[in-house]
Image: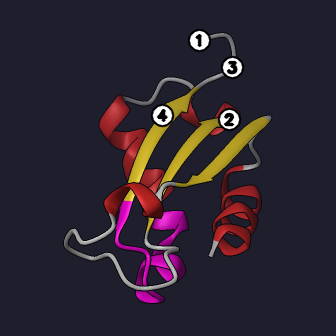
Amino acid sequence: MQSLIETRLREKLAPSQLSVIDESHLHAGHTGWREGGETHYRVEITADAFTGQTRVARHRMVNAALTEAFDNGLHALAVKARAPGE
């Protein structure tokens, strides 16, 4: 799942900085969690595509890029999206 997330974000948003962290272990027993993890991730991303966009628009761009991941079991995503220089 982590590889899929990284690949799709690089393809769709061409980030200059990208960090994808599996935080599934922090959510064991919570809604959406499953044995083996890969359900809850944190993404920190910097991309030119976010310049002039609101925080909500940036999150929507990230979520749209990750439709395949959500369709394949990604349950929750925490996003910190920045434009260069922020």
Looking at the rendered image, the disc whose residue lies closer to the viewer, 2 or 4, is: 4
Write the start and end of the magenta stretch as one range.
Answer: 64-76
Q: Relative to residue 61, is residue 4 depicted above or below? A: below
Q: Quadrant of residue 22?
A: bottom right
Query: Is mark 3 in CB contact (under 8 Å) with mark 2?
Result: yes
The Cα atoms of the two marked residues, 3 and 2, are separated by 6 Å
Q: Residues within 10 Å of mark 1 (few under 14, many from 20)?
A: few
Quadrant housing the C terminus: top right
Residue 4 at x, y percent in the picture: 68, 74
Q: Which residue is mark 3?
A: 84
Which of the numbered marks, if any, corresponds to residue 47?
A: 2
User: Pointers 1 and 3 in contact (CB under 8 A)?
Assistant: yes
Given the image, on which type of amino acid does mark 2 rest?
A: Ala
Nearest to the observer: residue 42 or residue 45: 42
Looking at the image, the residue that sits furthest to the top is 85
N-terminal of the two: label 4 or label 1? 4
Q: Earlier in the sequence, mark 2 or mark 4?
A: 2
Q: Which residue is labeled 4 in the image?
A: 80
- Judging from the image, what secondary structure is the residue with disc 2 in? loop
Give how far apart the Cα atoms at labels 2 and 4 are. Answer: 11 Å
Residue nearest the observer in this picture, 67 or 31:
31
Amino acid identity at mark 3: Pro
Q: Which residue is mark 1?
A: 86
